[in-house]
Image (cartoon, grey):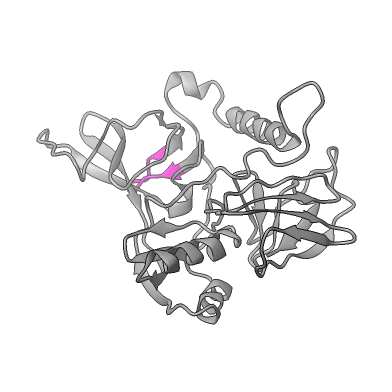
Amino acid sequence: MIAKEITGNIISQQYGDGKLNVPIAFEWFETDKKRMRKVAEDGTEFGIMVGRTIKDGDVLAETEDKRYFARIKTAQLIEIPVSSMKEMGRLCFELGNRHLSLKVENDRVLVPYDHPTMEYTKKIGYEPHIIEGGFDGFLIVKAHAGTGTIIPGTNKTTGDVAEEEQEAEADKEFPAEKAAGHLDVHAHDAGEGEPAEGHHCHCHEHGHNEPSGATEHHCHCHDHDHEHGEHTHEHEHTHEHHHDHAHTDETVDADHPYVLKPGEYEMNGVLHRPDGSHSHDGGRTWHTH
């Protein structure tokens, strides 16, 4: 079955038609994927392509006697309490440089758990705790949607083109069955325990002149430029900002794209590894903050 739109929400709305509510389980990091394959609790297979972020309780499809809705799984989270705007600002600054998804509330920040982040927030003076809870409504910053180098004669980057090609490939997964309203599904999109990072909050603006030609734009209260090679820095003021580049894979190019390894994942055009390193140029150059 194809789910192409969200028609309601069983949490915020009441239904009196007697239909059986059947959940379709999602990990938090799957909720903004444009296309995916899922299996409902009753075994019904779905091609999900609603085109917007899925929220807990969203109704994705209905039959004569059933209503299929999204159930967002809970996750292990780091809860970081804050007591002032100054603490909040610095925390978002630090976590933004680590390319993490954030859920910001009045007196705390939530991020998906990983050990390096837990230890890092302790090191910089916060008191993080591990909790189990829902992770929705997190910040989605499209800071890296235009990664790569500008293609002459266009307003697109190589990263934009790569993303379009990925979407075109995804379209092929939903062929003639799309029009017929069903999909023969043989695989599950995301395995249990699959990591997820990608959306992140940035508070500064800087350019990185990498060997790949990739450029990053973030949102901070200051500007600074990095030129890697001789590794010179120009800053309007002093702060700690370290970049360690893991390596460059010379075998990766337009004709030989990078293949994700177990534990690695892609979000918003950025590739991530479990050790915290990430790549903005399709797996050719990996670096960590």
Question: Does the rendering let one see residue 118?
Answer: yes
Place residue 9 in its image quadrant: top left
Q: Which image quadrant: the C terminus?
A: bottom right
Residue 124 position (above or below residue 93): below
Left or right of 176 on screen, residue 166: right
Left or right of 146 on screen, residue 31: left
Work out which residue is located at the far front of the displayed protein and give it: 236
- Prevailing secondary structure class for the magenta stretch in the rendered image: loop
Residue 145 position (above or below residue 153): below
User: Where does residue 100 sit, x and y in percent of width and height?
Assistant: 54, 59
At 55% from the left and 72% from the top, the residue drawn is: 117
Question: Does the rendering let one see residue 27?
Answer: no
Which is more toward the observer, 43 or 124?
Answer: 124
User: Where does residue 141 sit, x and y in percent of width and height?
Assistant: 52, 46
Asked if the stretch drawn in magenta spans residue 223, the answer is: no
At 89% from the left and 59% from the top, the residue drawn is: 229
Asked if the stretch drawn in magenta spans residue 43, the answer is: yes
Tell me where the magenta segment starts and ends, as one range: 38-45
Left or right of 120 on screen, residue 180: left
Work out which residue is located at the far top of the displayed protein and give it: 179
Work out which residue is located at the far left of the displayed protein and give it: 16
Which is more toward the observer, 247 or 127?
Answer: 127
Q: Which image quadrant: the N terminus?
A: top left
Which is more toward the observer, 281 or 39?
Answer: 281
Which is more toward the observer, 215 or 136?
Answer: 215
At 39% from the left and 63% from the top, the residue drawn is: 85
User: Where does residue 46 sit, x and y in percent of width and height?
Assistant: 43, 37
At 42% from the left and 32% from the top, the residue drawn is: 50
